[in-house]
Image (tube, rainbow, N blue to C red):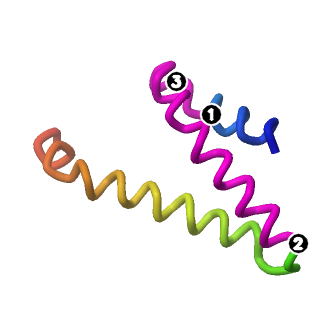
Amino acid sequence: MNFSTLIFGLGHLFYSFWYFLLTLPLGFVLAVTYLTFQKRKQSSFWTTTLLHSMRNALGILANIDEIMKNL
């Protein structure tokens, strides 16, 4: 789980080092989600993907004014 958390964070390192640090807790939550649903023999991949997508959507909605200004 720690390895996947680190890989998730490294995948976001190109934004900045601070963004990398901020994504580590989310990477941990996603890893726990995946393992929890895998144990239950449920759709672990899609549940984790949905959770990540919802988090990204919240980030977009929180910054929609800034996004619209830059279009």
> Which x, y percent locates residue 11?
62, 33
Question: Which kind of residue does numbered mark 3 sit on?
Answer: Phe
| Residue position for label 2 | 39
Q: Earlier in the sequence, mark 1 or mark 2?
A: 1
Question: Which kind of residue does numbered mark 2 sit on?
Answer: Lys
Q: Residue at x 51, y 19 (%)?
A: 17
**Viewer-nearest residue: 27 or 63:** 27
Q: Residue at x 85, y 70 (%)?
A: 38
Q: Secondary structure at mark 1?
A: helix
- Mark 2 neighbour class, 10 Å CA radius: few under 14, some 14 to 19, many 20 or more: few
The verdict on residue 1 being magenta is no
Give the answer, above or below, for where 48 lies relative to 7.
below
> Which x, y percent locates residue 45?
74, 66
Task: Report the side of 59 relative to 61 (left or right).
Answer: right
Farthest top residue in view: 17
The verdict on residue 31 being magenta is yes
Give the answer, above or below, for where 12 lies relative to 36.
above
Q: Which residues are magenta?
A: 11-38
| Image quarter (top left, top right, bottom left or bottom right) of the N terminus | top right
Q: Which numbered disc, 1 or 2, marks the residue closer to the eye?
A: 2
- Give the Cα distance between marks 1 and 3: 10 Å
Q: Residue at x 47, y 64 (%)?
A: 54
Q: Which mark is residue 9?
A: 1
| Residue position for label 3 | 14
> Which x, y percent locates residue 19?
47, 29
> Which x, y percent locates residue 29?
64, 53
Q: Secondary structure at mark 3?
A: loop
Question: Which kind of residue does numbered mark 1 sit on?
Answer: Gly
Q: Earlier in the sequence, mark 2 or mark 3?
A: 3
